[in-house]
Image (cartoon, rainbow, N blue to C red):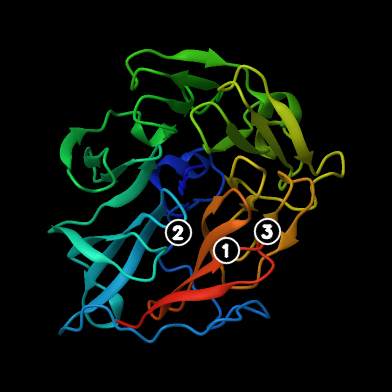
Amino acid sequence: MTPEVARFIWCRKRFVLRSLAAVATILVLAVVLAGCGGAKHPVAASTGQPSQTTVHQSSHTTVPDNLIFWTPTVGLLELRECGAGGHKCRGADIELTTDGGHSYHLIRHLRGLGTLYTLGSRGADLSFNRTALRTLDRGRTWKTVSEPSWGWQVQWATPQTGLRVGPGLTAPALSTTHDGGRTWQRLPSPCHGALGLGALAFASFPSPSHWWLACHAQPERGGPPDGASAIFSTVDAGKHWTLRASNLNGTLHAQGDFPIFALDGFGFFGGGYPNWSVSRDGGKTLARLPAGLIPVSAFNGGIGFAMEREHPLPVTLLETRDYGRTWHAVRRWNG
């Protein structure tokens, strides 16, 4: 995706599907920074030292919560303002980075708490209950928009192009929109053919037409045993799908849901902390990430970002530039 983080993420409403379908509550995008826990240092991975810079010294605690990247240098951070111990968060600052996460500057202060989602290569929604603040110019300007009732079912490639799992949870299917949700067209669901009726789907969008789809079986609905997963890709916005890997045919040696892939097949795949893997070939081969790392985004050429955190601090942003083989600390928040 352009990070979705994106297409990222953890604890995101758009991935709530699995909990509503009687599987376990997922996320994340954004469990990306919402208290997942983790080792203080990545295992045999980091060759750089964390910056000891403290963000916004004050009487309260500031806790990084959501992080998205549009490019390897430009992204947004939601930095929540919390009480002692990182609890009772009441507001947040939205900050912009243009140097790959090394430094940030404030672009908006919020009284409430939202969740960041990417919308294509320049857009983002900061979503609340039924409304969102939307930017289409990488944070320079924002406007308030309403979120429709089906918002939690839809993952967005751009402000106009989205993928919906539905209608209904009894027979999940795939539908797409290219006009912001005014009309929808049914798509074939590769998940159903591979993993049976009711298999859940989770998407990653490196471009408006090139998508990655991770499928997870539901044994309670007649599918294969729990843990059965498959990875598909499409280059024509879902009209045709290619099976990249499946643990039913022995080509996928992991189980999980969330794909975070770049166009060239570099990315991450996992079912929640700490079960994340990195792939350099679209899922055909996988390697386990160091314990405690939570992927945020992936880009062509093996560039990716991940977070590690304790409860609730410190939080460290790490970067890889060699397809996940080594990770270097970019920024550390202590409170």
Residue 180 visible in this rendered orientation of the protein? yes
Image-based side of 249 in relation to 133, left or right: right
> Label 1 neighbourhood size at 10 Å, few (<14), some (14-19), many (20+)?
some
Q: Nearer the viewer, mark 1 or mark 3?
A: 3
Pointer 1 residue? 273
Say what secondary structure mark 2 lies in: loop
Front in this rendered view, residue 262 or 72:
72
As shown in the figure, which amino acid type bears the numbered disc 1? Tyr
Q: Which mark is residue 277?
A: 3
- x, y percent for residue 74: 37, 55
Q: Quadrant location of residue 79?
A: bottom left
As shown in the figure, which amino acid type bears the numbered disc 2? Val
Marks 2/1 in contact by CB < 8 Å: the verdict is yes
Say what secondary structure mark 1 lies in: loop
Q: Residue at 40% of width from left, 64% of height from top? A: 34
Q: Residue at 16% of width from left, 83% of height from top? A: 58
- x, y percent for residue 117: 36, 45
Q: Residue at 79% of width from left, 45% of height from top? A: 284
Q: Earlier in the sequence, mark 3 or mark 2?
A: 2
As shown in the figure, which amino acid type bears the numbered disc 3? Ser
Which quadrant of the rendered structure holds the C terminus?
A: bottom left
Q: Earlier in the sequence, mark 2 or mark 1?
A: 2
Say what secondary structure mark 3 lies in: strand
Residue 224 visible in this rendered orientation of the protein? no
Q: Which mark is residue 31?
A: 2
Q: How far, Cα to Cα, is label 2 from label 1?
A: 8 Å
- x, y percent for residue 32: 45, 60
Image-based side of 218 in relation to 318, left or right: right
